[in-house]
Image (tube, rainbow, N blue to C red):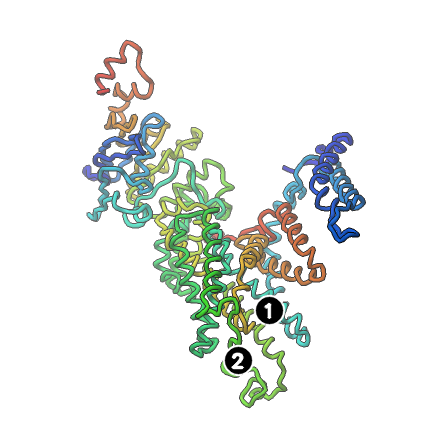
Amino acid sequence: MSTNAATTRLPIAAALKDATLAALVAFGLFALMVGLYTDQGPTGALVVSTRLEQLTIVVGLVFAGAFARALIFGREPVGFGRLQPAWLTGRAANVFRIVSPLFGSALLAFALLWPVVFYDNRYLLDLGILVLTYVMLGWGLNIVVGLAGLLDLGYVAFYAVGAYSYALLAQNFGLSFWICLPLAGILAAFWGVLLGFPVLRLRGDYLAIVTLAFGEIIRLVLLNWQDLTGGPNGISSIPRPSFFGLPFNDDEGGFAHTFGIEFSPIHRIVFLFYLILALALITNWVTLRMRRLPVGRAWEAMREDEIACRSLGINTTNTKLTAFAMGAMFGGFAGAFFATRQGFISPESFVFGESALILAIVVLGGMGSQLGVAVAALVMLGGFEVFREFEQYRMLVFGGAMVAIMIWRPRGLVGTREPSLYLKPEGK
Amino acid sequence: MTPAEPILTVERLTMRFGGLVAVDALSFEAQRGAITALIGPNGAGKTTVFNCITGFYKPSAGMMRLVHSDGSVFLLERLLDFRIAQLAHVARTFQNIRLFSGMTVLENLVVAQHNVLMAASGFTFAGLFGLKSYTAAERASIDKARYWLDRTHLTARADDLAGSLAYGEQRRLEIARAMCTNPALLCLDEPAAGLNGRESAELNELLRFIRKEHGTSILLIEHDMGVVMEISDHIVVLDYGIKIADGTPEAIRNDPKVIAAYLGVEDEEVEKVEAEVGI
């Protein structure tokens, strides 16, 4: 399929025609969006003015772009597979197999050293915690979407269940973080199974709609059950985590005093950083481990062909429910962490946008790929921060990046799948 | 072989889809350790019978009794599809190949041993911490996969994606995958479809091997008469959901009703044959 660029190149006349067509479409799109704007007139009423100059620039850019594209690539759709020389596609997988563990280790070392290097920078530490939270959420959702192939648009519901479980248990019963954490995970897993039951028969789009509704239901319940959740006011002054019983404060018996170091509020942040790193790594370890176990292989087999699974005696009901439960459990852990870090939670933190963001991380990273999800979370949240000043254009860049990745890497940043086991050649 | 003893007894199996009667009161037996072929023109209801036996359809009426060699009896119409595979040990292949194409050949064969491995992994908990009993079970499952890879000449492709195999190889892999579930009865839906002459001959060899070395009874749907006549011990012929003949390949080959169903009859004979068949 290695198409020679020279043969597909269009003659100038055809290229001009293509470019004119593209420019016309662009004109149709931008004539109202860019070409016209409303302004306050001298009498205070709204008047419509034109911005012909900008419109001309935009349409001109589209024309030039389409012309260049037609000359260089012809009418071939621009895609990674087509532009890549054939010799590379064959070897890319092998190269990747060698590079990815190294890159993964480098990323881990980078994460471990982050608080050491940026010890004084509260902003970067907070950003690191945020990224790691989403890495963990991405890895949790990866079990459901990437491995089991169940499109879940309401993942944030389990994040919310975890967060509220921790907040309510810690506030009402005074339980410590280390007791609440597993409880929050178990409760979220329970809700995962509860969601799993009614959607067992659903696939693809239908499943997506029901999970989307589930996410909204959880949010609306949190919003309206004033007595328990405080409604829109949320829950505040959630207990902070302690260093295995030693609180992070300036008192006698606090963390700093016990270890004989000077008190600094940054200790708690660093602790939180390593805590979420550990939680994320546990998620990663369990997922990687499970991929090599029968249940993990059944997840992937179910993603490939559910009917074939059943013909081999695999109980797809249980397999689906375990996927939902595992994914939900890690979402619950992340939720408990979120609650203890923020000290305040409200339903506003668990809107659909969060689900969409986590799903985007999984899809862009490469479904089923642990490394891809981590990189995608880093790029996406890091990107959000970098573009913070251009807040207005954030979604534009985000959308553009998504389109670009879907064109050039349709299977996500890391699209290759590592087999769960090999036939050892020395066995024969 | 041992004296004739049915492994599968189908009695008055009926499957209706709304007003359409796809299978009408079909009764037949498949002998233990034998290859039974189910043949018939297109749309005769063969695959529907398969789907009923393997639980993918719930039959409208009728009984299907499967008896293991240890005497345990399973009424297939009462079991869910995956239970039929898990408990009654009925494995199947599909007319349109259904492999896990994004997974490797070896993984396909290991997934087929799910229930054995699941028990060995202590339903995941023991396996999570890499207990010895599980690693041993996994090694055994790979050995078994390797055995079937050797038998189906796929060893060299073991670590390739199943979807990247050639058509004939995919057909063989599907049979190997079904055999990895240790079936008592293997149901093959058109295993020779799309195979060339050499590949069909290899298929015959493989099926004979399975019957001889593993004592697996085979139920087979096939259009390739070369395969059917050569390897079947017993043939059941369906037409429009009704059994029109049932016997040895020799008897079927000369049965006028079968010839009529497949080739049609001359105009002057239509009434005579219709009367014979009972239409």
Q: Quadrant of residue B132?
A: bottom left
Q: Rounded to the nearest whole Å, what is the CA distance between mark 2 and mark 1?
A: 17 Å
Residue B29 on image: x %, y %: 22, 35
In the picture of the structure, the residue carrying the numbered disc 2 is: A243
Disc 2 vs disc 1: Cβ atoms closer than 8 Å? Answer: no
Residue A358 visible? The answer is: yes
Question: In the figure, B184 relative to A3: above or below?
Answer: below
Q: Circle 1 sits in a helix, a strand or a loop, which is it?
A: helix
Residue in view at x 51 percent, y 57 percent: A142
Three-letter code for the amino acid on which mark 1 is drawn: Ile
Assign a secondary structure to mark 2: loop
| Residue identified by numbered label 1 | A129
Q: Earlier in the sequence, mark 2 or mark 1?
A: 1
Would residue A331 be visible to someone looking at this image? no
Describe residue B78's horizontal placement relative to residue A164 as left or right.
Answer: left
Q: Does residue A158 appear left or right of residue A316 in this picture?
A: right
Depicted B140 relative to depicted A133: above or below: above
Q: Chain of mark 2?
A: A
Q: Position of residue A46 (x, y in %)?
A: 73, 50
- Name the image quarter holding the N terminus of chain A: top right
**Residue B88, x across and y down, in percent:** 27, 47
Question: Looking at the image, which residue is at 64% across and 71% down?
Answer: A125
Return the residue found at the far bottom.
A252
Q: Position of residue B89 (x, y in %)?
A: 30, 47
What residue appears at the point 23 percent right and 13 percent down from the top-left corner? B272
Q: Amino acid at mark 2?
A: Phe
Residue at image point 33% right, 18% down: B263
| Chain at numbered mark 1 | A
Count the marks: how many? 2
Left or right relative to A27: residue B216 = left
Residue density around tag 1, few if under 14, some if 14–19, many if 20 or more, within 10 Å: many
Could you classify mark 2 by the number of other residues whose Cα lies within 10 Å: few (under 14), some (14-19), or many (20 or more)?
some
